[in-house]
């Protein structure tokens, strides 16, 4: 009886050493100045909330990273929502999610207004030329820290990591099936189950048909706003990998199928997302604005992030309750390792697109060196300086 009570107590959250307001303000700041996409943002959360402040335990962070990688939608936003859930449950998850997304949403709406009013964003090429390269230095350091903290000396974890890294680099996308298989492999090798095909366990997945049904829900022709909601709900609910992984899906729907934007406008939308802080998928807000003004931007953003929110908080209690069981713990370790491998692969893919000549290579290397050598210079300052230099250097290189 005492053991049962002891086991139950382990699933209860430890008392928070910070207030909900402090956490909200942190994510509001991260959403305002956090550049670099999901790789960098997840790295910032680990550095600030786990290493520096000790608000979140390393186990809770790893659980959140694993759940966020398994579920479709924007990785960084889902991780933030989960970390808000850890001590403050649904209220914390909801307010943290809003605080994290709202700054970049405001920025892309403002840029959308300027884009529509003045036509085009030619200055972006100069800014992104330098900022994109500097971001590679930032996310490379984040990927290195995640790798060293996650894998250790386990040969099987290194094998999973290398396979995931190689696949992501070659295919230029993250494969959720590969990540799931990594978790299953590590689970079967380290803590093989005694009763693998228990009927009750298999029945726990009966909720999935709901999401499969949503995938087949057709876009209706009633109004543009409704079409926007349906399309971006699908994008948020069924695109795995976040960040650049959502771009091909958006292109197929926005440009080829719905013809809401032309190819150049779509490229500009992606560029806006890359040079603004916060989650990369906030580009949906910019696209929504170009299609249907502020209403379109709001509906597109809500539709994209709502599935991610639900697919984080609904399974979160199970992660909290059962995540420390040996079988589940090893599964999560395997999934987390594959996720980190995919993140590192994404750094290579982004690097190939952003580092195109000697100046951009220098931007990336200098950024990495500065972050390694100095604790006083923050990422936003580096991004700002890079943007200014880019405005000068890019015209010369053309």
Image (cartoon, rainbow, N blue to C red):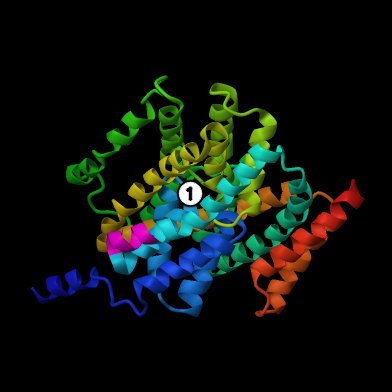
Q: Nearer the viewer, residue 46 or 128?
A: 128
- Asked if 220 appears above or below 125 in the picture, the reply is above
Secondary structure type for disc 1: loop
Residue at which label 1 appears: 74
In the rendered view, would you say 337 is above or below 273? below
Q: Is residue 232 left or right of residue 210?
A: right
Residue segment shown in magenta: 89-95
How many circles with numbers are drawn on the protein?
A: 1
Q: Hey, which quadrant is residue 56 in on the image?
A: bottom left
Side (left or right) of 64 relative to 397:
left
Question: What percent of the width, then of the height, locates residue 68?
Answer: 42, 53
- Coordinates of residue 196 in the picture (x, y in percent): 26, 47
Predominant SS of the magenta segment: helix
> Please, is residue 238 above or below residue 337 in the view?
above
Quadrant including the N terminus = bottom left
Q: Is residue 63 magenta?
A: no
Residue at the (28%, 76%) spot, across then down? 14
Examine the image and state in which quarter residue 95 appears: bottom left
Q: Residue at x 72, y 43 (%)?
A: 121
The image shows residue 295 at horizontal and vertical percentages of: 46, 38
Q: Residue at x 65, y 72 (%)?
A: 378
């Amino acid at each position: 009886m005492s053991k049962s009570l002891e086991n139950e107590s382990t699933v209860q959250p430890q008392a928070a050493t910070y207030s909900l307001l402090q956490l909200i303000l942190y994510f509001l700041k991260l959403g305002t100045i956090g550049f670099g996409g999901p790789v960098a943002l997840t790295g910032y959360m680990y550095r600030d909330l786990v290493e520096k402040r000790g608000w979140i335990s390393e186990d809770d962070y790893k659980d959140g990273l694993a759940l966020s990688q398994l579920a479709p939608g924007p990785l960084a936003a889902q991780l933030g929502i989960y970390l808000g859930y850890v001590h403050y449950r649904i209220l914390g998850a909801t307010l943290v999610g809003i605080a994290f997304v709202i700054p970049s949403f405001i920025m892309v709406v403002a840029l959308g207004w300027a884009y529509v009013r003045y036509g085009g964003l030619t200055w972006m090429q100069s800014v992104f030329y330098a900022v994109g390269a500097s971001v590679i230095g930032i996310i490379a350091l984040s990927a290195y820290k995640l790798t060293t903290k996650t894998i250790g000396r386990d040969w099987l974890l290194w094998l999973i990591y290398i396979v995931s890294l190689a696949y992501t680099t070659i295919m230029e996308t993250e494969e959720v099936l590969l990540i799931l298989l990594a978790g299953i492999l590590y689970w079967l090798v380290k803590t093989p189950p005694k009763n693998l095909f228990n009927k009750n366990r298999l029945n726990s997945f009966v909720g999935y048909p709901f999401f499969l049904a949503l995938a087949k829900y057709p876009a209706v022709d009633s109004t543009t706003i409704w079409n926007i909601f349906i399309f971006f709900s699908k994008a948020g609910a069924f695109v795995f990998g976040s960040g650049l992984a959502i771009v091909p899906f958006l292109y197929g729907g926005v440009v080829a199928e719905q013809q809401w934007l032309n190819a150049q406008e779509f490229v500009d939308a992606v560029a806006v997302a890359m040079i603004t802080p916060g989650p990369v998928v906030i580009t949906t807000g910019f696209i929504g604005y170009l299609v249907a003004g502020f209403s379109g931007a709001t509906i597109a953003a809500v539709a994209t992030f709502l599935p991610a929110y639900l697919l984080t908080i609904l399974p979160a209690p199970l992660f909290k309750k059962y995540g420390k069981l040996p079988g589940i713990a090893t599964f999560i370790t395997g999934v987390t390792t594959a996720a980190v491998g995919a993140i590192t692969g994404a750094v290579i893919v982004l690097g190939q697109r952003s580092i195109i000549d000697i100046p951009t290579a220098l931007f990336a290397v200098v950024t990495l060196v500065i972050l390694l050598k100095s604790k006083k210079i923050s990422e936003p300052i580096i991004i700002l300086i890079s943007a200014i230099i880019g405005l000068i250097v890019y015209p010369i290189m053309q």
